[in-house]
Image (spheres, grey):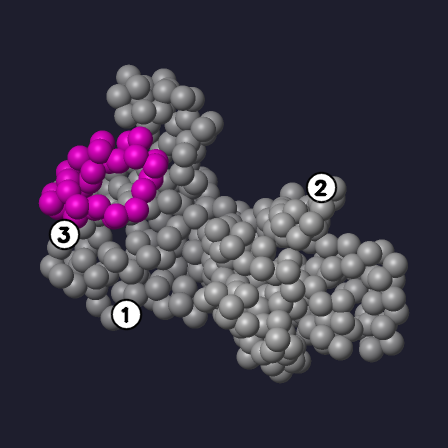
Amino acid sequence: MSAPDPFIITKALDWLAEGRRIALATVIQTWGSAPQPVGSQLLIDADGNFLGSVSGGCVEAEVITEAADVIASGEPKALEFGVEDSMAWKVGLACGGSIRIFVEKVAGDRASSADSLLHRLVGDVEARRQVALITNLATGAQSLVHSGDEVEKELAPALGDAFRYDKSVALAGDEGEVFINVFNPTTRLIIVGAVHIAQQLVPMARALGHDVVIVDPRTAFATEERFGEAEISRHWPDEALPRIGVDSRTALIALTHDPKIDDPALIHALSSDAFYVGALGSRKTHAKRVERLLKAGVASADIERIHAPIGLDIGAQGAAEIALSIMAEITAVQRGKVANNR
C-alpha cells in the first residue's frame, strides 16, 4: 500500500465543500527513526481541527501552528525537524529521527470544483489507476501524472521507481526541488482456495492494507462462517478472475492442491501483469504442475514467474507460520527485496 491515505484527500474536498479554510501537510523526506513514511499527510483547518498524521504525534502540534500561518498567507512552507534542532527535543524526535514536511494551503473554489486536481486525483484512486501528484516545493505548483511520458526526462526514472516500489520521493528538477507523491492503487491479494492457510492469511493481509478476495467454487469451503466479512467468489477461477481483475497491483496465490482449480487461476495470472504469483506445494508437486502448464501452452518464461514452493523459507510449521511466510514474500517482492520472478 502507498503511504498517502486517499481518505485525507477525500476529507479535504469535504471540508472545502463545508466552507472551511484548510492546509495539507505532507512528509517529503525522512531520516533515521522518523515514525511516519514519506507521503504521509495531515489535514488541518483554520480552527486547528486535523485528521491524519505526519509523525505519529511527535510534531503535529508544531505543524498545526505553522499551518495556520500558511492558511493566512497562502504561501507554502517547508519545515524540518531533527535531532540537530533545538526544537527536536520539544517535539519528540530526540530518538534520532528527522523529517521534512511541506505545508500548503488548499485553495477553496479552484480545489473544490468538479474538474479540480484533487477531484481528478480521487477519481484516479477510485478507478485503480496509478497516479502521482508532483509538487514544485518552491512555488507550490502541482500536476497529476500517470507515467514517465508525462514528466521531464530527468524525472522519469525516479517516477518509475516511485510507482514500482511504492515510495514517494523528493528530488532536484530543472525548475527546482520537486516532490513525487505516489498514490498507487491498493494492493489486491487474490487467494485461490478457501483452505485453513487462507483463514490465517486474511487478517494478516488486511492488517498490511491489502484488499483480499477469496476464490473457491467449493461452497463447503468458501463460507462466511469460516471467513467472516471477507469478499468471497464462489465461481471457478476462469470465470471469477476476469470479473475481479488482475493488474500490476495484484498478487495471486493458489492454495488448493487441486489442478482443476489452481491451474486455470495460474494460467490467468501468468497472462496478466500481476506482480506476484505463488503456488502451494513441494518441489515435486510443482514439477508436475510445470508439466501440466507446459502442456496447456504456457511459456516456460511465464511459468518461471511462479513462486513455488510458496513463501520465504523461515522453517514454517503449521498454517499460521506458512501464512506468515507467504505474506513476507509478497511484501519482499513488492518492496524490491526479493526478485519477482519476471
Of mark 2 and mark 1, the one earlier in the sequence is 1
The residue at the point 73 percent across, 54 percent down is: 310
The residue at the point 46 percent across, 66 percent down is: 229
User: Of residues 298 and 289, which is closer to you in this image?
Assistant: 289
Q: CA distance from mark 1 to mark 3?
A: 19 Å
Write down the region rendered in magenta: 43-72
Q: Position of residue 322 (x, y in %)?
A: 68, 50
The residue at the point 55 percent across, 79 percent down is: 243
Identify the mark at residue 221; answer none if there is no mark: none
Q: Are marks 1 and 3 in contact (CB under 8 Å)?
A: no
Which mark lies nearer to you, 2 or 1? 2
Residue denoted by label 3: 21
Label 3's element? loop
Q: Is residue 112 above or below residue 244?
A: above
Q: Is residue 293 above or below residue 14?
A: below
Residue denoted by label 2: 314
Label 1's element? loop
Residue denoted by label 1: 115
Which mark lies nearer to you, 1 or 3? 3
Q: CA distance from mark 2 to mark 1?
A: 50 Å
User: Of residues 327 and 25, which is closer to you in this image?
Assistant: 327
